[in-house]
Amino acid sequence: MKHSDWKALSEEERKTLGWHRHPHIRTATIYAIVFAIAFIVVILGISKNSTVHLNRKPTAREAFETAKVFVKDKLKQPTTANFPENSYKPVIDTATNSYQLQSVIKFITTSGKTIKSNWIIKMHYIKGDWSEKTSWQVESITMDPEDK
């Protein structure tokens, strides 16, 4: 029922109609439901994001994921890089937040040749979200053979 129709009713007719036919109550109910759903979505989003990466030191697997980004940055064609899934050797010193990782990478050079290269990275975890590059300080990256 529209608000203009509601106004046209007499007092007796208004009393006989149910509450759900009242235009203001129906509108308020719809807004309340939409607000409740939006509130739940926001709360779930906040609680999900706050526990992902913060307030702990990175694991070897997380350090490997970050190291792959730094190694790719050293390549001339980083999109051709292919890393093994779980083939890496970590050396972690949690007292100094030092991470040394060793693995292999296959990539295609600018001349079209596929090369398999061993790499070692030494880096320090500074603080913050481990998945961000700014949370790390790279000491050295060694690739043998290098991308030329």
Image (tube, rainbow, N blue to C red):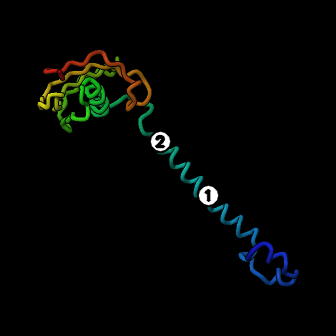
Q: Residue at x 30, y 29 (%)?
A: 69
Q: Which mark is residue 134?
A: none
Kindly state the secondary structure of the residue where label 1 is placed. helix
Measuring from the top left, give residue 86's x and y in whole percent. 20, 37
Give the left or right position of residue 106, taking residue 77 as reference: left
**Nearer to the camera, 143 or 77:** 77
Label 1 crowding class (10 Å Cα cut-off): few <14, some 14-19, many 20+? Answer: few
Residue that lies at the very extreme toward the right in this rendered image = 11
**Nearer to the camera, 129 or 147:** 147
Q: Residue at x 50, y 44 (%)?
A: 47
Give the left or right position of residue 7, taking residue 120 as reference: right
In this rendering, is residue 24 above or below 38?
Answer: below
**Which quarter of the picture shows residue 7?**
bottom right
Q: Residue at x 78, y 72 (%)?
A: 3
> Which quarter of the image is occupied by the C terminus?
top left
* Three-letter code for the amino acid on which mark 1 is drawn: Ala
Measuring from the top left, give residue 79's x and y in whole percent. 25, 35
> Which quarter of the image is occupied by the N terminus?
bottom right
**Which quarter of the picture shows residue 70?**
top left
Q: Which mark is residue 36?
A: 1
Q: Earlier in the sequence, mark 2 or mark 1?
A: 1
Residue assigned mark 2:
49
**Nearer to the camera, 97 or 82:** 82
Q: Residue at x 55, y 49 (%)?
A: 42
Measuring from the top left, give residue 43's x and y in whole percent. 55, 48
